Image (cartoon, rainbow, N blue to C red):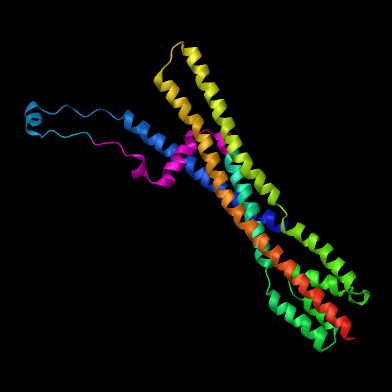
Amino acid sequence: MKKVFAVLAILGVFAFGMTSNIFAQDEEYSSEDQTTVQEAPAPAPAPAAVAAAPAQEAAPAPTTQELGTFKTLKIKFIEGGAGFMACVALCLILGLALCIERIIYLSLASTNTKKLLENVETELLENDDVEAAKEICANTRGPIASIFYQGLMRIDEGADVVEKAVVSYGGVQMGLLEKNVTWISLCIALGPMLGFMGTVIGMIGAFDRIQQMGDISATIVAGGIKVALLTTVFGLIVAMILQVFLNFILTRIEALVSEMEDSSISLVDTVIKYKAGK
């Protein structure tokens, strides 16, 4: 849990700094626009100068592609409103924190199973030293080594007891591997749902303004609908990002579980050979 809180704190500070930078830039752009508007108009040129000057076309406004993808996303995030956009961003931060915690845990859970099994077989079958095999498992990280240790603790009770212990403790380790996966799925589901809710509330606000105006204005309708749909867009982006991480995590869990099952069968076979040789 300490790792989870540390990752959450780091991501929270990063998100807060990024959000503050976004709103600071937005205020800077607004102040620049107001300064431009308040400037005194330039004096009209002389007719001769107007006649001599060539006709120049007005410079086109910068398009979305010219601004850049990241800058465009920042601008659209500000336009979407602080309420639902903050909730969607919180889902992304929490989901990413949980994904990073699971990826770190699964990386630490990986071990060289083939080498571990060879060392255990060597101590049991060749050296007849159960305590040395237990020490090897105790000094090796990962769920497979823990399962081996629990099985070797009951080696004197027979191969059937060892198999039951391995199966039972394998279920415990599987639960530890799948920890927090449900919360990641919740963040994936909440992102689009919050986006849709923001869209619906934004549409209701747009229709309220139409009712107050008493007339359908294309500007009012288009602006309200655009702001309302931005929450849905960012909610879908959050869901897609977290879904990629979730699929990677589930793939790693499936690989570890399959490796645990194969190694458990090999351990039981080794114990049977050990008991038969005594």
Q: Is residue 122 visible?
A: yes
193 is higher (above) or lower (below) than 252: above
Q: What segment is highlighted magenta in the picture?
A: 59-86
Kindly report the secondary structure that dominates the magenta region of the rendered protein.
helix
Q: Is residue 90 left or right of residue 65?
A: right
Residue at the spot x=56%, y=47% of the render? Answer: 15
Residue at the spot x=60%, y=57% of the render? Answer: 248
169 is higher (above) or lower (below) than 13: below
Count the labels in the image: 0
> Could you say where residue 51 lies in the image, as x and y percent from the top left?
7, 29
> Could you say where residue 237 lies in the image, as x and y percent from the top left?
52, 43
191 is higher (above) or lower (below) than 200: below
Residue farthest to the top? 214
Residue closer to the observer: 154 or 50: 154
Residue farthest to the bottom? 127
Residue closer to the observer: 231 or 30: 231
Q: Quadrant of residue 258?
A: bottom right
Q: Is residue 60 left or right of residue 158?
A: left
> Could you say where residue 95 lies in the image, as x and y percent from the top left?
63, 48
Residue at the spot x=10%, y=34% of the render? Answer: 53
User: Can you say which quadrant of the picture contains the C terminus?
Assistant: bottom right
Q: Is residue 262 magenta?
A: no
User: Can you say which quadrant of the picture contains the N terminus?
Assistant: bottom right
Residue closer to the observer: 130 or 276: 276
Q: Quadrant of residue 139?
A: bottom right
Residue at the spot x=76%, y=74% of the render? Answer: 266
Q: Is residue 73 left or right of residue 254?
A: left
Q: Is residue 75 magenta?
A: yes
Q: Quadrant of residue 57?
A: top left
Q: Is residue 138 visible?
A: no
> Could you say where residue 76 lies in the image, as x and y percent from the top left?
46, 37
